[in-house]
Image (spheres, helix red, strand yellow):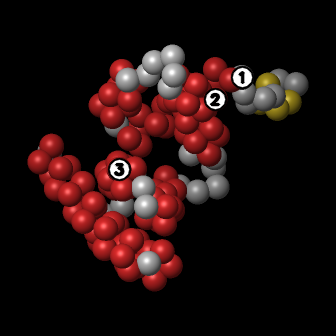
Amino acid sequence: MPTASGPREASRDEVHDAGMTVRRQVLSDAHVDRANAKVDDFTADFQDLITRYAWGEIWTRPGLEKRMRSAITLTAMIAGGHEAELAMHVKAAVRNGLSRDEIKEVLLQSAIYCSVPSANTAFSVASQALAEMEEEG
């Protein structure tokens, strides 16, 4: 963060707070509240790591819009076979402005570079996630 005398490093708390803000914007308050309710002594450091680094350091960078970050994240979840995370990030992609058709195109593109079986699973997961969003309103 800049000061009158020049740029300064953001404090650990500032990065965490910025990360929490973006995490809530992207994943929803309800999702983050559920995750935070499950934090215990064993998982607290991991949740802090996610909030500071994934959300506070990467998702806050100016180089890409959230829409693009969501598209990239969808592909990464497909490539890694992370179905539960994929469902969460399909919903996040919609919140970040990706349309159903754009999500479909990301999944089709992933079929070529990640594998047809991976994309097949992704279509199933994404269909369910989108249906849940419609039910939730």
The answer to whether residue 53 is left or right of residue 114 is right
Cβ atoms at labels 2 and 3 below 8 Å apart? no
Residue drawn at x 41%, y 43% as measured from the top left: 26
State the separation of the CA atoms marked 2 and 3: 26 Å
Q: Nearer the viewer, residue 23 or 129?
A: 129
Q: Is residue 109 visible?
A: no
Dividing the picture into quadrants, the one containing residue 8 is top right
The answer to whether residue 16 is left or right of residue 36 is right
Residue drawn at x 64%, y 29% as measured from the top left: 15
State the separation of the CA atoms marked 1 and 2: 6 Å
The answer to whether residue 3 is left or right of residue 54 is right
Residue drawn at x 63%, y 49% as measured from the top left: 62
Name the residue carrying label 3.
84
Q: Which residue is most to the bottom?
A: 112
The answer to whether residue 91 is left or right of residue 40 is left
Q: Quadrant of the N terminus?
A: top right
State the separation of the CA atoms marked 1 and 3: 32 Å
Q: Quadrant of the C terminus?
A: top left
Residue 15: mark in rendering? 2
Name the residue carrying label 1.
11
Q: Residues within 10 Å of mark 1 (few under 14, many from 20)?
A: few
